[in-house]
Image: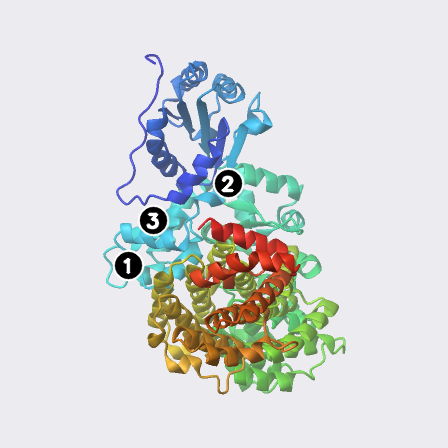
Amino acid sequence: MKDYPAEPIPDRPSDHVHRHRVSRRLDDAARAPVTVLTAPAGTGKTVALADWARGRRPAGTVHWIDAARDTERLAQRLFAAASHGNGVASTVVVDHVDRVAEPTARVALAELVSDPVPGRHVVLAGRADPVPALPRWPAPGDLAEVPADALTLTPDETHEVLVAGGVHLPGPERQILHRRTEGWPAGVRLAAASMRGRPDPTTELGDGGAFDEAVTGYLTAEVLDRLAGPLRQVVLDTSVAPVLTAGLVEALVGGDGARTLAELCRAGVFLARRTGPGGWHRYHPAFARAVYRELCGRDSRRATLLHRRAAAWQRVYGFPAEALRHTLLAGDWADATELLDTHWADLLAGTRFGRPDGSAPRLPSAGRDDVRLVLAFAAERLHAGDLDGLRGYLRDAGRLGRHRLFPAFQTAEARLAGDHRRTASAAARAIALPDRAGSPDSAAALALLSQGVASVGAGDVRAAAPVLNTALTLAERAGMAQAQIAAAGHLALVEVVRGRLRHAVRLGRQTLATADRFGITSAVELGWARLALAGVACERDRVAAACRFLDETVTFADDDPAMSAAAQLLRARLCHNLGHPVDGLNLVRAIHRGHAPATLPAPLRRALALTEAELRLALHQPGAVRPESLDERGEVTFAEWSAVVRAAVLLATDRPLSARRALAPLLARDAGVPSTCRVRAALLGAVAAERLRDTAGVRDGLALAVSTAAADDIRRPFVTGGPLVRRLLLAYAPTLRRERVAGRELLDELCRAFRGR
């Protein structure tokens, strides 16, 4: 069309990484006449749309309108786009749509989106949603929204962007960067630019380093300085508490907190509403960090006042750890020791992920002789996950003489250090400590939580389960939010190992819901809860859900080698689900390369060996299975899993009778075998029976596998069982249906899936 004032599609940057996932998301949204993509600065909206638009060119013409350029003719361009509609397939992209401010241009934009034309697709992209401000809106069915988190980089994409930018980081440092940026594309590119060509790139990620300076400069120029004066001050003031609710906003800046939060969200700052019942909003950590530095640099006295206001609110409506942090940053030492005396048990119940940073409170020289104040600082460092800082304050406290809470602090220090034997020993000494009110519930909850976590680390999940259950009950009764999250998060993982998947899902969801209710976004135990939910999704062969939970787990895993390795191990198992055992084996090797054996607990090392054995069997390499992975002597956590793998090796080496004998204890009624292992054992029993020409044994094995799997919605053993399991299930399905075997819906579902292969 001659008079159509289109602009060329923007060029892609030299370090561009194509993201198929994002393009597919935009393709899905393009089924509606209008797509709205709203995301803060630096999320890669323009680059993603340009990449996607170039791929759509064969399907029709792409007309690009940048509302930030040539604003004098913007209305003319939009009216021309609205009048263009001759049935020819076309896509109109209006970038920086939040810059459309002139009334005539708004009318033209409303005409473009509210009157759909066959064959024409409109995409609106900007930092704020333009639709509510338009004089006319699209019909509800004509609008598709692509959320900001669709543009967030995954851990693998973070690696690709770094490599494209000429930076190669080791795995642990890469995880730290991904957690700090939370996949914010501009943040990752700024990190790459600050590290490129440096002999030790990781030094640039430290406090006050080149990366910090680059992020602060970018966000100040692109976000903070573009806000109107009053709103800019609100952002600065609320940066002292990166997790906000309406009541906390009112305590900090006054006014209507809900309205202020809505205004901040509309302004395109890095603030997102959390799911869950608490009505909490959260700043992106990179943004909160940059703005807080700006606040302290401009007016440190106001920062102190704001911390005092936040502490007062948290003491009444929030939770103790945040109240203590704000109190210490405000320099109110008497209030800090009062919080320690009253809430010590919940303060010591868990940690948040994170590294020590410039916002950590500093103990004044005059307070070094006050053991209660020193312990208050120790509790804050525990909550921050700063083991070295915690130990330093505990040494200072020890020089001042023994305090009644010292055993509880020793328990917390041992737990943070991952020393399970020392944790259990210290917890036994701490269990008799009363809280200030004389109630034993808080002390008992903390001690039992520590004992349960120690048992999990030692691999004794049967011993851990009742202890953690009791700790959770006591924590709920005592109103200890942090302890509830810690107990339920670890218990969810225990239930996955025990094969009690429904219980694991309930506990995992309970953990996340409790965190949402109290606005606790960074407790390390949330990583274990997500890992448990990923494990359940893996056993149920819901690969996309498992990958989503694992991506979320990475955020919590960089300070915990065991959590990081467990997440990678689960990815290896998912590769087996997908029929890619070679990829799974490569992931297992990467875990061995990236983690010294001494840094991983014994149960995790055992799980690695068993997973490697299963992947070797999937590749028809039974001779490559290491004999030590089949040694069940002294095995506590994975005895049943070890027995299943041993039987699988016997079958793979053509010893079906020996395999059947090895499986017999796992198939006995009321044997207490995890359901996931029982299903796998029943399927192997069916295969052994088929080799022995035992038709009834095949039928019984398949019937037991299907009925057990149906009770907990288990799919993985069937999916990873190989062609022989699929052939047997299809061959015996009619017989199983005639005999009305429990789990017929699952049987029908599996048969449909296997026939499609």
In this orientation, which residue lies closer to the viewer: 378 or 129?
A: 129
x and y percent of residue 139 in the render?
A: 58, 25
x and y percent of residue 372 in the render?
A: 61, 77
In this rendering, the answer to whether 115 lies above or below 277 is above
On the question of residue 555 being in view, the answer is: no
Q: Residue, x 63% and y 75% (percent of image)?
A: 465
Q: Residue, x 58% and y 52% (percent of image)?
A: 748
Say whether disc 1 or disc 2 marks the residue closer to the N-terminus.
2
The residue where tag 1 is placed is 168
In this orientation, which residue lies closer to the viewer: 444 or 290?
A: 444
Question: Residue 189: which numbered mark, if any?
Answer: 3
In this rendering, the answer to whether 315 lies above or below 70 is below
Name the residue type under label 2. Pro
x and y percent of residue 96 in the render?
A: 43, 31
Report the side of 195 relative to 558 (left or right).
left
- SS label for mark 2: loop
